[in-house]
Amino acid sequence: MHTKKDFRKPAPNRAKEYFLITVAVLIMDIGIYIFKFPNNFSFGGVSGMAVVLSKALPFTASQINLLINLLLLVIGFAFLGKNFGVKTAYVTVLSSILLNIFEKFFPMQHPLTDEIMLELCFAILLPALAAALLFFENASGGGTDIIAMIIKKYSTMNISTALLATDLIVVVVSFLIFDTLTGLCSILGLLAKTLLIDKSIERMKLNKFFTIVSSNPQPICDFITHELDHSATTYHAQGAYSHRDRTVILTVVDVKQAIYLQRFIHRTEPTAFTAITKSSEIVGKGFSSYI
């Protein structure tokens, strides 16, 4: 007996989502607490602010990190509304609590190693890996991400540029408080972090745009609408060489669904001409909304 396979996006599993978010926050906080705080790396973010302010205030970096995050959380809900997201609130609070737990049970009085460049790499890569996981689950890391989201909402800046502008202030201040080596490492960290975040966001939003020239379009259109739960646009065309009538099908699907669609086209109409284009900016029903 043939069983119909469902190629549509699966319904979200909340338990799995929050498990992955929790793992991402844990990875992020390990990178911040073990590699960023002890070396005074301050390449932006609330953790960077905390490093700078801890030298001028009678509080630890973890305590300052918690206070700033809670303040930004309130500001985020005020300016961005309910759509600001429960996940962002969860990430912000959990991250701050974990940093304070680390500080209490695993105090670090000095860097883990004497290799500052090695420590800088881990201070960048671990939070970047965490950011990729958070983006995959449509969550935000909170902190200065909130400021960047507000700037993005009320200006023409994209999220990466807004993050860079926000974090650059922290890096400049680090030069005034710490030594030149720490300041230069902070600049290098900021540039690498911005690049990684930009690539992560682009990957998260990636979709595939299909242009299919078909002589038997109905099965393909049915597969797109019924199996992939997307729509398509069709129009009639004529081959320049053969002068035969053809139908051109235009549709956009996500990366995983693109594989299923390619396989179906190859199985159903191997002679169909298919052009596939990557796109990270699709706006409309079923995809992103105007902001």
Image: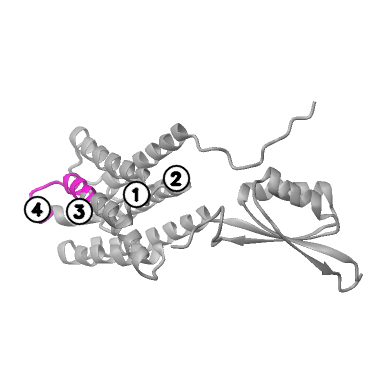
Residue 55 image offset from top left, x and y in percent:
12, 55
**Residue 220 % position (x, y):** 77, 51
In this rendered view, identify the residue nearer to me: 288 or 28. 288
Q: Amino acid at mark 2?
A: Leu
- Report which residue position mark 4 lands on: 57
Helix, strand or loop: magenta stretch: helix
| Whether residue 14 is situated above or below residue 288 in the rendered picture | above
Image x and y of residue 274, in percent: 76, 59
Left of 229 or right of it: where is 94?
Answer: left
**Please, which residue is most extreme toward the bottom here?**
240
* Residue corresponding to mark 3: 51
Amino acid bearing label 4: Leu
Q: Secondary structure at mark 3?
A: helix
Asked whether residue 166 is drawn in magenta, I would say no
Residue 60: say if magenta: yes
Residue at (31, 67) in percent of width and height: 165
Which of disc 3 and disc 1 is earlier in sequence? 3
> Which residue does the numbered mark 1 point to in the structure image?
82
Q: CA–CA distance between discs 2 and 1? A: 22 Å
Q: At label 1, which amino acid type do we have? A: Lys
Residue 90 image offset from top left, x and y in percent: 32, 41
Residue 122 appearing in the image:
no
Range drawn in magenta: 55-70
Q: Earlier in the sequence, mark 4 or mark 2?
A: 4
Q: CA distance from mark 4 to mark 3?
A: 10 Å
User: According to the image, label 2 marks what residue?
Assistant: 133
